[in-house]
Image (cartoon, rainbow, N blue to C red):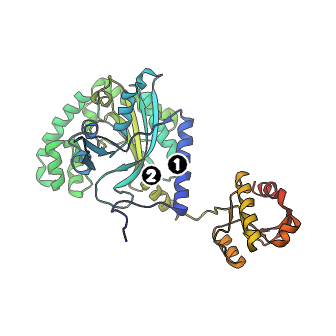
Amino acid sequence: MIQLVKGTKDIYGAEVKAWQRIEGKMRNLCETFGIGEIRTPAFEFTELFVRGVGETTDIVQKEMYTFTDDGDRSLTLRPEGTAGAVRAYIEHGMHNNAQPTKLYYISPTFRCENTQAGRQRQFHQFGVEMLGSYSAAQDAEAISVAAALLEEMGIHGVQLRMNSLGCPECRSRYNKQLREFIGNNLDKLCPTCKERFEKNPLRVLDCKEESCQAVIANAPSVLDCLDEECTAHFQKVQDILTEMGIDFVIDPKIVRGLDYYTRTVFEFVSDGLTVCGGGRYDNLVEECGGKPTGAVGFGLGIERLMMILEKQNGPIEEVPERDVYIGSMGEKGLIKAQGITLALRKAGVRAECDTVERSVKAQMKYANKIGAKYSVIIGDSELENNSVELKEMETGEKETVVLSELAEVLKAKLK
């Protein structure tokens, strides 16, 4: 038997219903905030991610699914959503529209990395990108969307942690200080961080190894390297969030795992796990071939979100999927049941009928199994009288209903 590829998952049954509810909340929230949906291809030219995500990142170095097509072009399955959204923003001249441009996406995403709870090789990312503003107010709006989303999802104990990486000049000053500090403690780092140190010392701050955490605890703070303008920008973000009633803590160790971030970066953490993260990326549009454009965004993995929700609220429960089951007896009853079922469905009633030609007993067992709230049986007497006995499955109560009025009676009961 051919099985699932490692790091992938089938989503079905009660779980897919839960996903649909979550995605519905995401879409409704984005509509409230004036954020429009964008759908980009699952694969792009590899160069987009090398330039956009950063050549020294773990994603580009180790985790991308890259292949060469018949035209000898290097293509990559998207490892994250921002680069594709930025490419679309440039290519379709969205900068000519009223600014800022606010976009969201819910997309399958691919990374060849070690699988663990809440982390797969194909995962689904919800992301929001806001392009066309350098203002701290835009940072705060993006953060407020993420905060509102997590509140809407009912996730408990969420903490917003923020930092500022400053502009490229601030970052360069910090890199120099950090390189000197880590260089003096290189022997205490894990093998991965020793490699990271050579390419980009900021990546060391991401490490969760205890030995590296002990070193990082005494590292210089990037906030001490910010110039006056970047300091003022970060303070303004904090002032606006305070006005919005959004609590936060400042964490100078947050750098995020992508090279394109500038100034504000943030993470929402619950139960020790990062649920959502993002930040400002003022140079990415220009890096990808567009005009200088301020931008900020965030993303979250839906699998991880679902894992945290299940941990906090318990396993996903089956939700009744059918309003009524239309059972049948005999050849004529079977045929009539199909027509009644279709008419009910067109009226907006979630109806199901027998298409396997089971016995009546087996049909009622099936009706219980699918969670039908009501049931009827169509047989010779029902056809002759043009009426049915509508049975409430939970209580067993019955009432006679004229067939032509069945849809209206059911809709009234299901309100």
Query: In this orientation, does residue 267 appear?
Result: no
> Nearest the camera: 186 or 19?
19
Q: Is residue 31 left or right of residue 141?
A: right
Residue lying farthest front?
331
Q: Secondary structure at mark 2?
A: helix
Residue 257 position in % (x across, y down): 29, 44
Q: Residue at x 19, y 43 (%)?
A: 201
Q: Are marks 2 and 1 in contact (CB under 8 Å)?
A: yes
Residue plotted at (34% across, 50% down): 110
Which of the 4 quarters of the picture holds residue 179?
top left
238 or 107, nearer to the observer:
107
Q: CA distance from mark 2 to mark 1?
A: 9 Å
Residue 399 at x, y = what percent?
85, 67
Residue 328 lies in what quarter of the image?
bottom right
Marks 2 and 1, the one that precedes in the sequence: 1
The circle drawn on residue 312 is none
Residue that mark 1 sits on? 23
- Give coordinates of residue 274: x percent, y percent: 38, 50
Going by the image, does 273 lie left or right of 400?
Answer: left
Position of residue 262 relative to residue 255, above or below, is above
- For residue 318, say whether it is visible: yes
Q: Is residue 100 above or below residue 174?
A: above
Quadrant location of the N terminus in the rendered image: bottom left
Q: Amino acid at mark 1?
A: Glu
**Residue 102 position (above or below residue 152):** above
Please name the residue shown 73% across and 56% down the image.
344
Position in image of residue 261 (x %, y %): 31, 36
Q: Give the amino acid type for the residue marked by disc 2 in the picture.
A: Ile
Q: Is 107 or 150 nearer to us in this picture? A: 107
Circle 1 residues within 10 Å: few <14, some 14–19, many ≥20: some
Q: Residue tagged by mark 2?
A: 302
Q: Could you say whether the residue bearing mark 1 is in a helix, strand or loop?
A: helix
